[in-house]
Amino acid sequence: MDTLKSVLVPINKEGYRFIAIFAVVTLLLFMASTFLGWIGVVLTLWCVYFFRDPDRHVPTSEGLIVSPADGVVQVIERSVPPEELGLGNDPLLRISVFLNVFNVHVNRVPLAGTVIKQVYRPGKFLNAALDKASEENERHAVHVRSKDGKDIIFVQIAGLIARRIVCDLSDNQEVRTGERFGLIRFGSRTDIYLPDGVEPQVGVGQNMVGGETIIADLVAENNLAISVEVR
């Protein structure tokens, strides 16, 4: 039963239309050639896999910042937050998570709080693995403030193949740690900026699980006991 659950995971609503398109194309390919039809089957199964939306065991202890996305930590460096958020030019520690086409692409809120501002900005579609993608690519930036006044910035960034960013957040919305908030289609990158003085608990090259992997701890006592909730 556990094995079946690991395979039959929920599909994100953004994927239904694409799965249907892939399935129709597969039928047409079978009409032309059995070989091409089976290629279509493989691609359709990949599309289903891409839009999977599994539940996650989200840490609920106060002050824990979790990864906004699945993927690999590619960069940890100080950088100026997106200018469209109007947060000034002081660099903050930025952690960049790169998602390939096989990662879960559903994004999750890193820390509970209130959405102060969220802004979409058009841009290029450079390879999301490039450092300059944070500045030049299409993106959607979000500023959340926790109840104790800590500011977290996280950014959905389109990639070379990704052509659509979905963000369901709105200004003044209350959000929970690990809550689903959007998705980036077909390869992308997610940046998160930590408050001054907060040290990361992850390293470059580390695999991240969105909504589960702890990026940083705003409260030292969290290291003693961490509770989780499935979401």
Image (cartoon, rainbow, N blue to C red):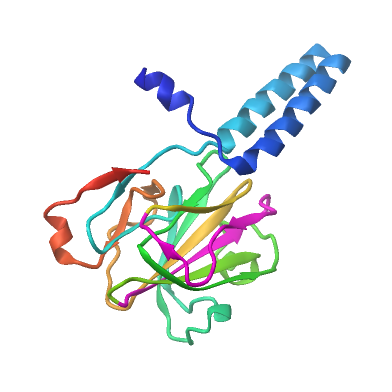
Q: Quadrant of residue 24?
A: top right
Residue at image x 34%, y 48%? 212
Q: Position of residue 35 (x, y in %)?
A: 78, 15
Residue at image x 30%, y 64%? 200
Residue at image x 86%, y 15%? 31
Q: Is residue 173 left or right of residue 43?
A: left
Q: Position of residue 129 (x, y in %)?
A: 56, 56
Residue 176 drawn in magenta: yes
Residue 17 drawn in magenta: no
Extreme residue in the front direction: 173
The one nearer the camera, 99 or 10, is 10
* Vertical order, 57 against 130 (above or below): above
Q: Position of residue 90 (x, y in %)?
A: 43, 85
**Residue 205 in sight:** yes
**Residue 159 in sight:** no
Q: Is residue 109 left or right of residue 118?
A: left
Q: Quadrant of residue 26?
A: top right
Q: Position of residue 202 (x, y in %)?
A: 31, 57
* Vertical order, 66 against 143 (above or below): above
Q: On the rendered image, what quadrant is the N terminus found in?
A: top left
Residue at image x 24%, y 68%? 218
* Vertical order, 144 against 182 (above or below): below
Q: On the rendered image, what quadrant is the C terminus found in?
A: top left
Label count reads 0
The magenta stretch spans which residues?
Answer: 149-177
The one nearer the camera, 170 or 34, is 170
Q: Is residue 177 left or right of residue 69?
A: left
Q: Quadrant of residue 223?
A: bottom left
